[in-house]
Amino acid sequence: MNFPAIIASINSDETSLCQWDEALGLLEGWYIACLSTNLKKKPKAIKLFGRNLVAFRGKNNQASVMVDQCAHRGAQLSKGKVQNDCLHCPYHGWGYDSEGKVAHIPSIDGSKPPKQGHAFRQRSFATREVDGAIWVYLGDKDPADTPVYRMPYFDKPGFVSYYMTGVYAGGLSSIVQINMDVSHTVFVHGKLFRNSADRLVKSTIEVTDREVEVIYEPVVEKLGAAPWLTNPKKLPINHSDRYFAPNVTQVDYHWGDSSFQFVSVVSPIDRDSSILYTCISYRLPIPKLALKAMQPLVKGYKKAVNRQDIAVMKHQLAGIRGWPTTKQNSVKADMAHVAIDKILSAQQYGIELAEQVKCKREMNFYI
Ligand code: FES
Ligand SMILES: [Fe+2]
């Protein structure tokens, strides 16, 4: 990829990435439907790529996700209830098993479900519950060919992990990009996260078929609200940002025996909004109890940072919607963003990523 100082013409319209009928190859991936703790006995309505889905727990408490529409007369199954391991429609009571097969039709079977079930079914999707989240595969290909992203530090000894969720304006491309974007931090999160220091940031970016990796040169810098607590020895901080297409970013900060990791998974709701699930894992060389006691502080801090991102994403979407046909421009600090757009586009249309996009090179810019 050749990056002059100014890179022109990125298509600003990402709405097609987030609509079921236009997303095409982007449906071939694992998306978080909801967190494990948010799916209990009641079925849960979920919207992904503008379409209504329902999640429920059937046999052995196993999570399933299916189309939120009854195969009889179309009522929303999420308004029904789970009984005898089946999801029952609120209208005439048809019951669906975990694979979407109609197991019980009260007007035929009475109150007793038959052994064989019936020939009708509704589309259900491959579902996996790992690392505290329920993931669903939306495409037509064999889900076994695509591994679910695993949270590197979830439930790992020494780490505290938790999820934070937020609804963001925008879709797959813009939300993934803000998570990989260093240059906005001094403008949006100045004082709270990182102050502008007119410093040259040096990094190396590597782009492969489905991934972007940015490794920053370690520096001593004041990061976060309490650097005197988290990095009292003022050790150099190793920082890396990774993108795994189509919807996962992994941001790591590491110094001495301390680590903070933010894994963010974008689940597009519709053309205007997405849910961002962020798994935050951290470890500091302090006693475990003290680490746990810190959690409300870490949570409050991260919430405040996220609120700032949510606000600026709203402004970005409003700006784009106001003049949807205008092209955007990029500079060197946006190399990861440009690569992400190209990777998403290649996956959407099922084409190979152009050879000239794949690269490993320096990416230097000021913050
Ligand atoms: S509409 Fe669902 S059972 Fe009739
Ligand atoms: Fe941010």
Image: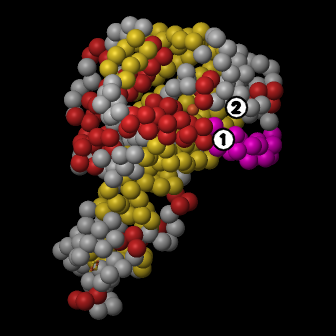
Q: Quadrant of ligand 1?
A: bottom left
Q: Give the vertical position of 130 relative to 314 (above or below).
A: below
Could you tell whether 144 is left or right of 213 in the image? left
Decide whether the magenta segment is chiefly helix, strand or loop: helix
Q: Which disc, if any, is residue 192?
A: 2
Please tell me which residue lies in front, 214 or 320.
320
What is the distance, in whole Å, between disc 1 and disc 2 at their CAs? 8 Å
Q: Is residue 292 magenta?
A: yes
Quadrant holding the C terminus: top right
**Amino acid residing under circle 1:** Ala
Q: Amino acid at mark 2?
A: Leu
Which residues lie in the magenta part?
287-305
- Magenta stretch holds residue 293: yes
Q: Nearer the viewer, residue 58 or 344?
A: 344
Residue under the point 33% across and 13% down: 1
On screen, residue 229 above or below 135: above
Residue visible at 25% across and 89% down in the picture: 107
- In the rendered view, does 200 fall on the left or right side of 106? right
Task: For label 2, count other residues whose C-alpha is less than 10 Å away and answer few (under 14), some (14-19) or many (20+).
Answer: some
The image quarter containing residue 44 is: bottom left
Residue indicated by mark 1? 304
Kindly tell me whether residue 205 is visible in this rendering.
no
Looking at the image, is mark 1 or mark 2 earlier in the sequence? Answer: 2
Using residue 99 as the reference point, say whether residue 177 is left or right of it. right
Q: How many marks?
A: 2
Name the side, left or right, on which 24 lies relative to 206: left
Can residue 110 be seen?
A: yes
**CB under 8 Å between callouts 1 and 2?**
yes
Q: Residue furthest bottom?
A: 110
56 above or below 242? below
Residue 192 coordinates in the image, percent (x, y): 70, 31
